[in-house]
Image: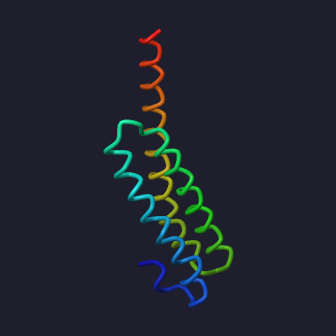
Amino acid sequence: MLTQDFPRFFRYSMGSRMVDLTLDMLSLIYKANSSYEKVGVLTEFLDRYRMLQMLFRVCVEQKVITERKYASFGLLLEKIGKQATSWKQYNERGMKKQEDKRQ
């Protein structure tokens, strides 16, 4: 786990927040996958995703993690963000098509 290497102050402030955000994001993926209305859940997921991204950047600025570690996590975060954004856009288009059919 990344936060094990954090200095004590950052481990219990930013580190625990990052873990909580990650668990929230996992919960939201499950919720979106099992619900009919996905757009709202995915919007909430993307909000937490952006917060996690920002916390990673703060960790680099504060020299809590190296730029090299951030780069590896950054690539993974980028893939997650692209997938979630595409999933949201797909569902928005589906909702629009259903509305058009009703009219």
Give percent across and percent down for residue 4: 46, 85
Give percent across and percent down for residue 33: 33, 45
Looking at the image, which is closer to me, 33 or 37? Answer: 37
Looking at the image, which is closer to me, 37 or 9? Answer: 37
Find the residue positioned furthest to the top.
103
The quarter in which the N terminus is drawn is: bottom left
Q: Is residue 95 left or right of residue 50?
A: left
How many numbered marks appear? Answer: 0
Residue at 42% across, 39% down: 38
Q: Is residue 63 left or right of residue 97?
A: right
**Picture colour scheme:** rainbow
Give percent across and percent down for residue 58: 65, 71
Note whether 96 is above or below 86 in the view shown. Answer: above
Q: Quadrant of residue 22?
A: bottom left
Find the residue positioned furthest to the bottom.
8
Find the residue positioned furthest to the right.
61
Residue at 68% across, 74% down: 61
Note whether 19 is above or below 98 in the view shown. Answer: below
Q: Quadrant of residue 53?
A: bottom right
Q: Is residue 92 left or right of residue 62?
A: left
Looking at the image, which is closer to me, 1 or 94? Answer: 94
Note whether 5 is above or below 73 in the view shown. Answer: below
Give percent across and percent down for residue 16: 51, 77
Residue at 43% across, 45% down: 83
